[in-house]
Image: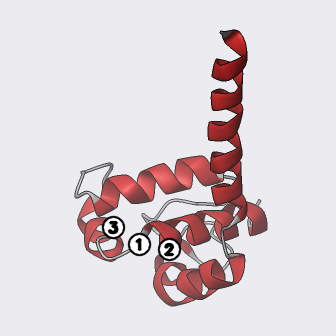
Amino acid sequence: MKTPILWAVAAVLAIGMSHAQAADESAGETLYSSNCAQCHGPKAKGMASFPSLAGRDAEYLSSRLEQYRAGEKVGANSGLMIPNAKNLSDDDIANLAAYISSNFQ
């Protein structure tokens, strides 16, 4: 009985990992340059009241972008982030998160 459960868990983990590997950092770079860098800076270190994204892991970044896309108010800049995130696809979010987390420490 344990063997089928273990296989099911392994399959779910493999699917999740393949989705994470599917992120296109090049597409994320394009999105970041055209939509994020103006406020978060070219090195994602933040500017004025906009927080640094450098050093954040992809899971955190994805989660936050999904919250903004859903219209959730999460912090002082929600009023600016919600309209910017509302049209992001799941792939856009994965690509942005992969690019930021991999390139800005």
Q: Residue furthest top?
A: 1
User: Which mark is in front, 3 or 2?
Assistant: 2
Q: Position of residue 54 (x, y in %)?
A: 67, 60
Residue at position x 49%, y 84% in the image: 38
Q: Amino acid at mark 2?
A: Asp
Q: Amino acid at mark 3?
A: Met
Vertical placement of residue 53 versus 88, above or below: above
Q: Secondary structure at mark 3?
A: helix
* Residue 73 seen in this snapshot: yes
User: Which mark is in front, 3 or 1?
Assistant: 1
User: Which residue corresponds to mark 1?
Assistant: 89
| Mark-to-mark CA distance, 1 and 2 | 5 Å
User: Which residue corresponds to mark 3?
Assistant: 81
| Mark-to-mark CA distance, 3 and 2 | 15 Å
The answer to whether the residues at label 3 and label 1 have Cβ atoms under 8 Å apart is: no
- Taking 68 as reference, is 44 left or right? right
> As rendered, which of 4 and 35 lies closer to the eye?
4
Mark sitting earlier along the chain (3/2): 3
User: Which residue corresponds to mark 2?
Assistant: 92
Query: How many discs appear?
Result: 3
Query: Split into 4 quadrants, where in the image is the C terminus?
Result: bottom right
The answer to whether the residues at label 1 and label 2 have Cβ atoms under 8 Å apart is: yes
- Taking 95 as reference, is 21 left or right? right
Query: Split into 4 quadrants, where in the image is the N terminus?
Result: top right
> As rendered, which of 34 and 16 lies closer to the eye?
16
Q: Secondary structure at mark 1?
A: loop
Q: Position of residue 3 (x, y in %)?
A: 73, 17
Residue at position x 27%, y 66% in the image: 82
Residue at position x 58%, y 77% in the image: 41
Q: Amino acid at mark 1?
A: Ser
Label placed on residue 25:
none
Residue at position x 42%, y 59% in the image: 65
